[in-house]
Structures are given as C-alpha cells and as structure tokens.
Image (tube, rainbow, N blue to C red):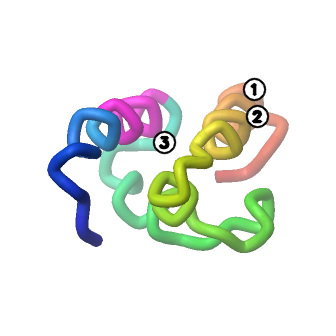
Amino acid sequence: MQIEKNELIQFVNFVNECCEVIPDEEVADWINTPHSYLNMDSPFNLFKENNIERVFRLLYFIEMDEADK
C-alpha cells in the first residue's frame, strides 16, 4: 500500500472514518480486502480511484447493521 504525499491527509481521514465503524485492529485488513458490497473491490482501491463515497455508504450500512463488515 502506497499513499501519495498529496493524498496523506485525505487517507488519514478515510482511515479515521473506518475506525468509527470497524474495530481498530481489523481496519488494515478490511481496507485491503475486496468486499461483495463493493463489487469485489477493496476500500483502498476505491480510495485510490477517488471513489470513496461507495465505501462511506457501506460503512453507514454496517453501522446500521444492514451489512456485514
């Protein structure tokens, strides 16, 4: 996983959002794992593609117990 210097703050904010819903010790694996709710894409790939709204929607549904992490 490599983060560009100009993406660092956005990535930290992204990880912090994930930590609000996913247990801290699971976030690194969760971010790098393809998920069926994301059409078998990983949250990190979506971050790199500047498409994190899909991840935020998934986090919302996980928080509401309407999706599995």
List x then y, in percent, for residue 18.
46, 38
Residue in the image at 57% along x and 66% along y: 42
List x then y, in percent, for residue 6.
22, 44
| Secondary structure found at label 1 | loop
Badge 1: residue crowd in 10 Å (few <14, some 14–19, many ≥20): few
Residue in the image at 57% along x and 57% along y: 46
* Start-end of magenta stretch: 13-20
User: Could you give the CA–CA distance between mark 1 and mark 2, rounded to whole angstroms?
Assistant: 5 Å
Q: Earlier in the sequence, mark 2 or mark 3?
A: 3
List x then y, in percent, for residue 7.
28, 45
| Secondary structure found at label 3 | loop
Residue found farthest to the front: 6
**Badge 2 amino acid:** Phe
Are dots 1 and 2 in contact, CB under 8 Å?
yes
Residue in the image at 33% along x and 35% along y: 10
Instruction: Name the residue beneath numbered marker 1.
Output: 64
Instruction: Name the residue beneath numbered marker 2.
Output: 61
Image height check: is 65 above or below 42? above
**Badge 3 amino acid:** Ile
| Secondary structure found at label 2 | helix
Residue in the image at 32% along x and 43% along y: 11
List x then y, in percent, for residue 58.
71, 42
